[in-house]
Amino acid sequence: MTRSVLIVGGTSVDTIIHLDQFPTPTAQTLWPRASYRALGSTGAGKALNLAALGDTVTLHTLLGEDNEARFVREQLAHEHIHLLTTITPEPTEQHVNLMDAQGDRISFFVQPPPEPSDVDWEAVRVAMEHSDVVVINILAYTRPALALAKEMGKPVWIDLHDYDGQDTYHQPFIEAADVLFLSSDRLPDYRPVMEALVGSGKQFVVCTHGRHGATLLDRHGQWLEQPVFGVDTVLDTNGAGDAFFSGFLYGYGRHASLADCLKLAAAGGALCVGSDRLAAPGMNPAQLVQQAGLPL
């Protein structure tokens, strides 16, 4: 079953620098274990993984008129990805990510995401009409898409990332969402926040805990826990959260149980960290299902 997914927001060009440990705040010269240029950001990660899993993806993003924009286009060239762009006078979004040996990250937004006021939403509206689900990423420019999705009655999935349970910036996204994902990085007491979010009318909320797995709460009060799947080698954790999200959405769109969706999500995350790309080479439905330990 092929589904049509619209993703609004989120591409960048990242410089990834791998260190044995994060540097101390002193003047010094460092020799990284590895460094490379890569496609980044949450929209790109979700688009590549969902496309690899056979979904038809439309991705809207902001790009500058620069070499980084060309790099983004090249990296997103996929038969299942239709790229919609708004060209801005500002440069394409860029990050520098320091990674330690445990896979933890310090990210520098060396070129922050633009916030244009003149986005033409007509192409997004047309794509939304033909989409089964809409994923709106928490960038400032994407807020008009929230109203469009509500107007059309489309199911909206939103990833709040490291939401702290209080930041008002996230509130319009929370209100528009049918399904929410978030991490516990800034939420040591995450269960009351999940309960409040589900109580506000969400179908379910998924909270990820990095190497400590994930927790789900649905509207019926059912709690589910999912550990991570072990991998032989962790090469790069960039994009693991988006691969997790994509594995879950893949299962949900094919009527898997929430428990099995969590397994597929964890499988997506495991496959991602074993590669240095946002979507693992060779990622496909059979590989995902096998990694999740589910029957083919």
Image: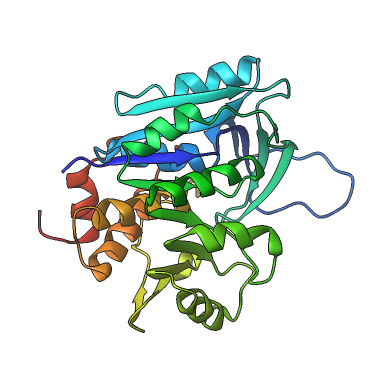
Residue at (42%, 62%) from the top-left corner?
178
Residue at (31%, 36%) from the top-left corner?
130
Residue at (36%, 84%) from the top-left corner?
221
Number of marks: 0
- Way the structure is coloured: rainbow
Left or right, 191 with respect to 25, comes to left
Residue sitting farthest toward the left: 296
Image coordinates for residue 124, horizontal then vertical, percent: 46, 32
Above or below 8: residue 86: above
**Image quadrant assignment for residue 201:** bottom left
Residue at (67%, 54%) from the top-left corner?
21
Image coordinates for residue 175, horizontal then vertical, percent: 54, 63
Above or below 94: residue 197: below
Residue sitting farthest toward the front: 151
Image coordinates for residue 40, horizontal then vertical, percent: 54, 37
For the N terminus, which image quadrant? top left
Would you say residue 238 is visible in this rendering? no
Would you say residue 286 is visible in this rendering? yes
**Image quadrant assignment for residue 227:** bottom left
Image coordinates for residue 69, horizontal then vertical, percent: 58, 20
Left or right, 272 with respect to 87, comes to left
Left or right, 272 with respect to 101, comes to left
